[in-house]
Image (cartoon, rainbow, N blue to C red):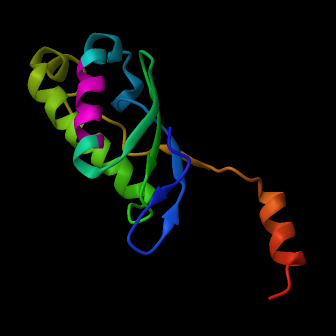
């Protein structure tokens, strides 16, 4: 796992923890788990994200990614959810007909949290105590 990413004019460490569920929280991910891994890997490769951890439960996923600062958390969630959801519904018409009659595989919402190498207190203390 890279701690920092170098860019043309910056250095970054942007890591996000996402959690989201299938629509109606149906416990169907055990059936499509291998495909979710593959689709998430393809998405990460396409957009330049690095999957640091991925856990797929029956009714939700945890995704921990490192990415460039040009990607907002909202865009990252959309990238993973839209691509995988579209393909999962196409690959599993029986699941679509049984569980997702309203369209869409994933719930609209999600959780996102950030992580970093230093705590909030360290940043606040640095800003308050450093002479500028």
Q: Is residue 104 visible?
A: no
Horizontal relation, residue 44 to residue 132: left or right = left
Q: Residue at x 42, y 61 (%)?
A: 72
Residue 109: x and y, percent?
43, 45
Q: 129 or 31, which is in the foreground? A: 129
Residue 18 appears in the figure: yes
Q: Is residue 16 above or below residue 57?
A: below
- Magenta stretch containing residue 40, yes or no? yes
Q: Residue at x 74, y 53 (%)?
A: 118
Quick check: is 114 in the magenta stretch? no
Q: How many marks on residues?
A: 0
Magenta stretch, residue numbers: 35-44
User: Depth check: 6 or 44 in front?
Assistant: 6
- Give residue 26's position: percent from left, percent from top: 36, 20
Prevalent SS, magenta region: helix
The quadrant in which the C terminus is found is bottom right
User: Percent from the top left, x then y, of residue 77?
Assistant: 37, 48
Q: Is residue 65 above or below residue 30?
A: below
């Amino acid at each position: 796992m890279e701690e920092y990413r170098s860019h043309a004019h910056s250095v970054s460490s942007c890591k996000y923890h996402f959690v989201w569920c299938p629509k109606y929280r149906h416990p169907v991910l055990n059936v499509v788990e291998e495909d979710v891994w593959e689709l998430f890997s393809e998405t990460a490769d396409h957009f330049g994200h690095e999957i640091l951890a991925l856990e797929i439960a029956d009714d939700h996923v945890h995704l921990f990614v490192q990415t460039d600062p040009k990607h907002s958390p909202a865009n990252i969630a959309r990238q993973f959810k839209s691509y995988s959801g579209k393909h999962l519904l196409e690959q599993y018409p029986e699941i679509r007909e049984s569980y997702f009659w309203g369209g869409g595989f994933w719930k609209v919402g999600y959780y996102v949290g950030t992580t970093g190498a230093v705590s909030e207190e360290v940043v606040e203390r640095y800003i308050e105590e450093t002479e500028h």
